[in-house]
Amino acid sequence: MTQENLPSDTAMPKHEDSVIEAGRKLFSRPVNFVLGVAQLEQLPPEEKTEICFAGRSNVGKSSLINAITGRKDIARTSNTPGRTQQLNYFDLDGACYVVDLPGYGFAQAPKDIVDTWHALIKQYLRGRVTLRRVFVLIDSRHGFKKADLDMMKLLDESAVPYQVVLTKSDKLKKGQLEKRIKEVVDALVKHPAALPQIFATSSEKNTGLAELRAEISTLL
């Protein structure tokens, strides 16, 4: 299923062909891992735009980053939730940083380490001047969980603009996906920092990836 096949009233982004092409060209450029940040002091200078991906553990975040960059393993995937334990910075050919946040909501690690990750995420989101947009990934099969709502509350309080990206949309039938999209769009009205337009994506089927690339290209 493509985003074009969804009803027009579901707040799915629609970009001109020229913007879609700009997104394709942007993500066809080299992308490389730069560094992993475990403490704020390790953050790179605020010299270029940062685009951030956040989501619960096992939501498909690494798979999505690999898919939009057209790489198989630029972001490490794992069947073990909570494997990403730091802010991972990727340089998109000097155009921007793509930042992969640690998965929240569950992690196979001691509580003190998990608490440290959460504190780092909060400090990063509240103080990063060059952060233009956070994409909050939600598993389309399950919708919002408490951990997602907690993250959205933090983004609202921090006044950081964010958009919801539904992952694994190919796992739902069309009617089920339409219902999930409506639920999400209706819920976002209550969140002041949330943008109303969302993405329904599938890393396996490449659904919605062109639109997501295009959206990112407009932020640079």
Image: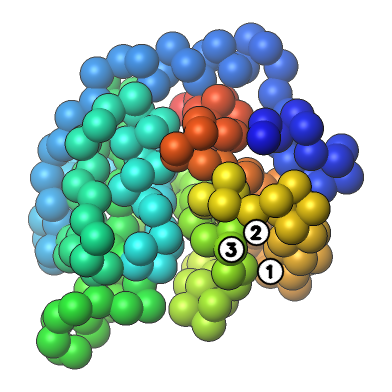
Instruction: Please name the residue shown 70% across and 51% down the image.
Output: 173
Mark 1 surroundings: few (<14), some (14-19) or many (≥20) residues within 10 A: some
Report how far apart the C-alphas of labels 2 and 1 lie in the structure.
Answer: 6 Å
Q: Which residue is mark 2?
A: 194
Q: Nearer the viewer, residue 3 or 204?
A: 204
Amino acid type, mark 1:
His
Mark 2 surroundings: few (<14), some (14-19) or many (≥20) residues within 10 A: many
* As drawn, 108 above or below 191: below
Q: Secondary structure at mark 3?
A: loop
Q: Secondary structure at mark 1?
A: loop
- Pointer 3 and pointer 1: residues touching (CB < 8 Å)? no
Q: Nearer the observer, disc 3 or disc 2?
A: 3
Q: Which residue is mark 1?
A: 191
Instruction: Please name the residue shown 34% across and 67% down the image.
Output: 57
Instruction: Please name the residue shown 64% across and 10% down the image.
Output: 18
- Point out which mark residue 220 bears: none
Q: Nearer the viewer, residue 119 or 17?
A: 17
Q: Which residue is mark 3?
A: 141
Indicate left or right for 87 with 194 as reference: left
Amino acid type, mark 2:
Ala
Residue 195, x across and y down, in percent: 68, 52
Residue 170, x across and y down, in percent: 58, 45
Indicate left or right for 50 with 90 as reference: right
Instruction: Please name the residue shown 79% across and 53% down the image.
Output: 175
- Pointer 2 and pointer 1: residues touching (CB < 8 Å)? yes
Amino acid type, mark 3:
Arg
Decide which of tag 3 and tag 1 comes sooner along the chain: 3
